[in-house]
Every structure is written in C-alpha cells, then in structure tokens.
Amino acid sequence: MKCADITLLNEKETRAGFGEGVFEAGQENPNVVVLTADLAGSLKLGPFIKAFPERFIQCGIAEANMMGIAAGLTIGGKIPYTTTFANFSTGRVYDQIRQSIAYSDKNVKICASHAGLTLGEDGATHQILEDIGLMKMLPGMTVIVPCDFNQTKAATKAIASYEGPVYLRFGRPKWANFTKEDGSDFQIGKAQKLSDGKDVSIFACGHLVWKAVEAGKILEEKGYSVELINIHTIKPLDKDAVIASIQKTGCAVTAEEHNILGGLGDSIAQVAATNHPIPIEYIGTKDTFGESGKPVDLLKKYGLDTPDIVAAAEKAIARKKG
C-alpha cells in the first residue's frame, strides 16, 4: 500500500471521538466511571452524563483532587476515566499521578484533550508540549496518542479492558479522519503500518500522522518509496515494527506535535541506537513554548507542517547516501 492510496473520510474532532468512545465503553462496562474538572462540554461528555448520571463525578476546578478520587475508585473495582485538558491532566497534577496512580499501579485512565500547538488561540500556557515525555517516564504508564476521530474512539473503548494506568492524548480541532470506522486497525502496543516503502521510514503520532500522509504522497510523486508507520502507542513501543522498518529503509523521520526532547522521536532514536543506528530527522517543537494563533498557522511557524516532513525525509535519505 502507498500513501497515495490513503483516502480522507471526513474531518472530525478527536475529542469528539473520545466522547463517543467513552459513552460506548459505559454501555459495555458498568464499572466505567467518568470524572471531570469542570470541562464536561469540552470533553464531549454529554451522552455519557445523560445515560449514566450516577457514574459521573463533577470534581470542579480541582484536578489534583480528581486524580485522588480516581485512584480511590479503582480499589472498589471501578474503571475511572479522568477528563480535562492535557496541560491540567499532567503538569498540574504530576505528583498525584506519580504517587497515587503510577507508583500504586492503579487502573486509572487519564484522558487528556486540547494537547499541542493545535489548541490554537488559547496560547502557550495551555499548549502543553512536554506531556508525552512526562507520562512515558512513569514506570508502568501506557501512553497512547491516536491520530484521528475513529482511532480515538477505538482507543477510548479499548483502554476500558486494558489493565493498568493509561495516558490517552487527543486534540481540539477538526482534523482529517481516515482510519477504519470500526476501529479494527487499532491495537494497543501494535504499530499501524499505513504504507510500505524502502527509501525512508516516517514514524508519526497524533495530528502529525495526517501531515505525514500528505508528505508521503508528495514524496511518492517525487519517486521515493515511503514507509509510513502510525505509532499511536508511544509506550509500550512496538520495537519489532520499528526495527523491521529501519533495517529495510536505512533512515527515518519522526513527526509529533510535541517537543522533540522526550517525545516520540527520542523513543525511536533509542531503539535505533541500540539495535540499528541510522540517520534520523526530527519534526516537532524545538525546546520552546508555543503561542496564540490559528492551529494551521502555528504548525507552519514551528516547522510541523507537510513541507517540513518532506524536507526532513529528503535530508534523511541524503544523509543515508552519504
């Protein structure tokens, strides 16, 4: 399969995929409980609240308390989903997550919306770009960054039956929706190969997967053979898929809506360095905070757009050739 074969279904918010997913998870499992820190509307919780009011807890603007309540609920066999913006889901409550959830190995699902630069006009204080790094460094924490509406819905449902703490990261704007509607192409911990190629591997997550698809189509038009892999599960990383790809292509690009320090790129580089060293180029923010602006404009300004991925792939290929 080639990138040119990947078709756009529609555009939908990944956070809306979460809303539908948690509603269906609640229908399927009576132990699913949802908590929010005064952001029920932003997290699209309306259907769940209407159907299961007794399983919804409004914690108010008290995120640390929400994490503590969630940890306690697991002791009684509940499966709590905490919901707020990514910045408040991690940076504001890191101590509570580390001590009460990760260290204690509690079955809490930390669901984080409005992540990355595409939060847009809310600006730097809310555009967290270091949360993947924060969460993947916690022992026992699973980190999932789905790429579109369908995959976010599938991931939201899947984590209900997945034992252990999970960090699920998704976004605010309408975005390209292109994976299978039934979610059958999603499996926790299993990378999703979107195209086969031999010249360069592109590893991407979240919103940047579609940007990588666009880049792959341009590269194919230029005569390059592109292997595009959606790393929706940052941790546990599908190391076998990464190694198999880089052994075939000999160079790689990583693309993420996150700081290149501590994110997906670092994870790929570690696997490459210890198994099959290759030239790697990194698409992500470069040790900086964001700013207010339209999502698409911010991606362009900070070097996370389609042309940036194309240029990075061509540079990686040139480095491989020496």
Image (cartoon, rainbow, N blue to C red):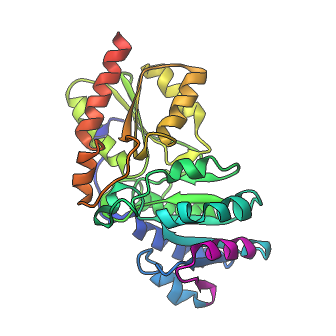
Seen in the picture, residue 195 relative to 178 is either above or below; the reply is: above
221 horizontally vs 55: left or right: left
Seen in the picture, residue 255 relative to 7 is either above or below; the reply is: above
Which corner quadrant of the image does residue 219 belong to?
Answer: top left
87 horizontally vs 97: left or right: left
Seen in the picture, residue 129 relative to 224 is either above or below; the reply is: below
Give the quarter of the figure containing the C terminus: top left
- Answer whether residue 164 is visible to the viewer in this image: no
Give the quarter of the figure containing the N terminus: top left
Identified at 39% across, 57% down, the residue is 148
Q: Residue 112: where, in percent of width, then height?
A: 50, 64
- Looking at the rendering, the stretch of residues picked out in magenta corresponds to 54-72
Was residue 2 drawn as part of the magenta stretch in this picture? no
Was residue 58 drawn as part of the magenta stretch in this picture? yes
**130 vs 112, nearest the viewer:** 130
Q: Residue 240: where, in percent of width, then height?
A: 59, 31
Identified at 64% across, 76% down, the residue is 65
Q: Main secondary structure of the magenta part?
A: helix
**265 vs 76, nearest the viewer:** 265
- Answer whether residue 8 is visible to the viewer in this image: yes
Q: Residue 118: where, in percent of width, then height?
A: 33, 58
Which corner quadrant of the image does residue 119 belong to?
Answer: bottom left
**234 vs 3, nearest the viewer:** 234
172 horizontally vs 143: left or right: left
Identified at 40% across, 53% down, the residue is 179
Identified at 58% across, 87% down, the residue is 52
